[in-house]
Amino acid sequence: MRIRKLRLLLEQYGDTTLRDIIVEIYRQLPRQVIEEKEFDAMLTQFVKYKDLQKEQEQPTVEQTIAQTDRFIQLAYDLQYLEPNPIVPLREQKNWYITAKRLLKHLRHYAHRKNGTQIAFEEFFFLLSSAAGEEPLFLSNDPFRLLKVSQVDFFQELVGYYKNDSHGIEWMERALYTALKVPMDVDTERSDLLLAVLAHCETAEHQEAYINCLNVHAKKLQSHVRIDADALSTYQEIRFAELHALISLRALERAETMLFTEYIPYFSHRSTPFRYYLDLLERAGLEQEHDRIERVGRKKRIHF
């Protein structure tokens, strides 16, 4: 029903009937909807609620940055996690509602070269820390609550890096972030690395991407035998590198890397070999897939 028609309809009822209608509607609403839409605040302080709604519809860029900075600082200070006089319990429980609103406003301004891109980046770091490093909110899985994956959020951030940079500086910054940021439970390190590759639209950028990854991998090689985390990161880097080589159709280089820089760093040869076959299959390279299968059989790799 349209709002205009609803208003005309409600004019037919008296105050008592309207009160009964409101109570019945409220009773039928799910608790989550009541909390997300802040219906309690609307019913108890309607004028204040309407004023706040107008203010929140689209604050200025300065207000958006200030509100985001405050939210981030309060979160790192554990004000959304522990009882305190600054953030009420109700707001602690509904932190993701505030986060959704701030994210919407940041996206409105983030295409401009201003402080909102920095605020967007800090917002991503905050959610990643809360997801993979330390609890900062009363609820887990911050990305799920905001209905955005860490990979999609990061890919959006990489786009801002790219628009605000010349040469390959954006790529180096993005790869460094992908390798250092805490991981969400639903995300693999290679997912973030491949999100950077998605922004490499030319062969030149893809080659630069491969070179950057190789530099990071070489730095880790001396640690992989004694550090399990370093080994895992190394494997993820080489996986992304293989993906890029296949995208470039540099299949000889990919095969060389597979047997010299990738497979030797797994306890079983079959696992990385299957990964590579899957990459070839997804790329539609059936003949190369069949050829590599034959190579695997000759090398007595079980897959």
Image (spheres, rainbow, N blue to C red):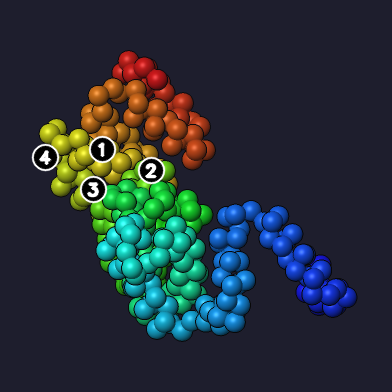
Mark 3 against mark 2, which lies toward the viewer? 2
Measure the alpha-carbon separation of dots 3 and 2: 26 Å
- As drawn, the label of residue 232 is 1
At mark 4, the secondary structure is: loop
Type of amino acid under label 3: Asn
Measure the alpha-carbon separation of dots 1 and 2: 15 Å
Residue closest to the eye, 75 or 118: 75
Q: Residues within 10 Å of mark 1 (few under 14, many from 20)?
A: some
Q: Find residue 73 and report its image quarter.
A: bottom left
Q: How many marks?
A: 4
Residue 119 visible in the current orientation: no
| Residue of label 4 | 222
Q: Find residue 200 and report its image quarter.
A: bottom left
Sequence order check: which comes first, mark 3 or mark 1? 3
Residue at the image position 39 percent from the left and 53 percent from the top:
138
Type of amino acid under label 2: Val
Q: Does 299 appear above or below 251?
A: above
Residue at the image position 42 percent from the left and 78 percent from the top:
64
Mark 3 against mark 4, which lies toward the viewer? 4
At mark 3, the secondary structure is: helix
Measure the alpha-carbon separation of dots 4 and 2: 28 Å
Question: Measured from the top left, where is residue 291 in percent x and y?
Answer: 42, 26
Sequence order check: which comes first, mark 3 or mark 4? 3
| Residue of label 2 | 185
- The image quadrant where one finds the N terminus is bottom right
Sequence order check: which comes first, mark 3 or mark 2? 2
- As drawn, the label of residue 214 is 3
